[in-house]
Image (spheres, coloured by chain):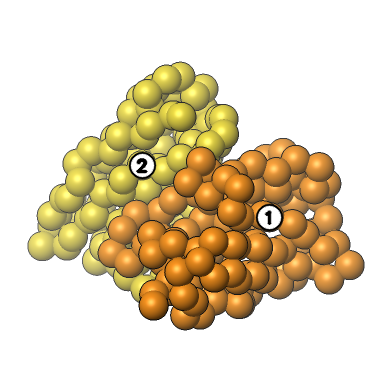
Amino acid sequence: EVQLVESGGGLVQPGGSLRLSCAASGFTFSNSAMSWVRQAPGKGLEWVSAISGGGSATNYADSVKGRFAISRDISQNTLYLQIISLRAEDTAIYYCAKGGVNYVYVSEFWGQGTLVTVSA
Amino acid sequence: EIVLTQSPDFQSVIPKEKVTITCRASQSIGSSLHWYQQKPDQSPKLLIKYASQSFSGVPSRFSGSGSGTDFTLTINSLEAEDAATYYCHQSSSFPLTFGGGTKVEIK
């Protein structure tokens, strides 16, 4: 059974930083494309970032480019999202999602999400 | 950036009725269009991938069609448990994008 468990969210001041984690199990993490998608309170889904199965390719939404960094640790079966220079508009539930093999980015399974609140 | 425009934004439907949700892409995306269901306080669930392929475990009343720029999600014989917001999503090119969502309410 595919399981994705996010952690690392919380209350952060504007300008602060955070690292989100997503522990993966139940599938071959090492060759699966992975994504981060966020949802602001009461709003729709917004794709944030994706990493290819081998980790060689990363992509970002324009709204987070230069502030967010996606990475993965194959040995720990964990996906990360490093966030710096947080803004109020980054407040959202952050979901990690499993794609297909290598460069297949359709998000087939999602975690339960972790809430990031940016406020003074 | 490929913009996905869903319609309608909201639909109130009686059980057993048929529901049709459309998603229009601002440029051709082939069949790289996927549909998700999100119930309140839950994470999204994949229903249909690549326009018309049903995902594992999804009830057969959900179906998808279309290619290029125009896509449709159909729910045949709506059930009470189908009350949710439905999103389309394209993986044709980066940045990946989602439609604005269609909220389906049960009358």
Q: Position of residue A74 (x, y in %)?
A: 85, 62
In the rendered structure, the residue with mark 1 lies on which chain? A
Q: Which kind of residue does numbered mark 1 sit on?
A: Ile
Q: Which residue is mark 2?
A: B99
What residue is drawn where x is 51% and y is 66%?
A: A15
Q: Total of numbered circles in the picture?
A: 2
Residue A112's disc is none
Q: Are marks 1 and 2 in contact (CB under 8 Å)?
A: no
Chain identifier, orange in the render: A
User: As drawn, is A74 to the left or to the right of B61?
Assistant: right
User: As drawn, is A85 to the left or to the right of B38?
Assistant: right
What residue is drawn where x is 89% and y is 67%?
A: A75
Q: Categorize mark 1 by other alpha carbons within 10 Å: few (<14), some (14-19), many (20+).
A: many
What residue is drawn where x is 83% and y is 46%?
A: A54
Task: Residue lying at the far right in this picture: please name it.
Answer: A75
Quadrant in which residue A20 is drawn? bottom right
Q: Is residue A52 above or below residue B92?
A: below
Q: Which residue is mark 1?
A: A70
